[in-house]
Amino acid sequence: MDEWQEALQRHVAVGVRTTRELIQLIRPDDWEKQPIPGKRSVYEVAAHLAVLLEADLRIATGATASEMARFYAIPVPPNQLTDRLDQSWQYYQDRLACGFATEPTYWGVADSSSGWLMEAAVHLYHHRSQLFDYLNLLGYDIKLDLFE
């Protein structure tokens, strides 16, 4: 693994660890709340975070729209979100370490494996920020360093 890959792995690991910590803070009565009307619920954001590293790289390797619809349709109960996040993180790490061939997405976008690895990292940080904001809007007092 080269310096760039090691740096990416380190930063995504921070994103995964802090996402896990945010998910573990969520109280049972807050899962279905929508802090911003018309947007995803707390559960929907957390569930998306739990699978997105894997989802993005499945898309990068040519998964079809119907394959992704089936992937996203697999329910992840709240008490299994951190385990699913760890599974998704392992999927990401395996591709980071071994490399992978990319295919254009089902909507026509093409990128390199490095580009997709970066996209997945940015996607993780984007939704981690969304979950952080949601929890703050719900009154959580979060004592968590989001960056190292």
Image: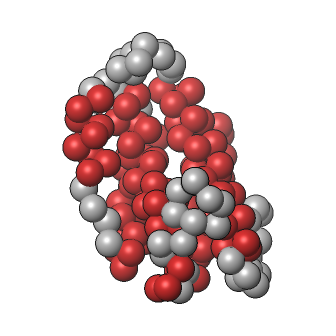
Location of residue 76 in the rendering, given as x and y in whole percent from the top left corner: 31, 65
Q: Position of residue 86 (x, y in %)?
A: 41, 64
Where does the image place residue 148, in percent across and percent down from the top left? 77, 63
Tell whether 100 sits left or right of 15. left
Q: State the image quarter where residue 122 is shown.
A: top right
Kindly identify the residue that appears in the image at 23 percent across and 32 percent down: 66
Residue 27 visible from this viewpoint: yes
Whether 92 is drawn above or below 105: the answer is: below
User: From what the image shows, is residue 66 above or below residue 43?
Assistant: above
Which residue is at the front of the view, 70 or 144?
A: 70
State the residue in front, 37 or 57. 37
Q: Answer with the quarter of the image where residue 102 lies.
A: top left
Query: Toward the viewer: 20 or 134?
Result: 134
Relative to 136, residue 87 above or below: above
Q: Residue at x 53, y 56 (%)?
A: 40
Vertical comparison of 82 with 148: above or below: below
The picture places residue 118, in percent across and down from the top left corner, at 59, 36
Q: Residue at x 65, y 37 (%)?
A: 4
Residue 51 lies left or right of residue 6; in this view the side is left
Residue at the farthest front position: 37
Q: Is residue 125 left or right of residue 84?
A: right
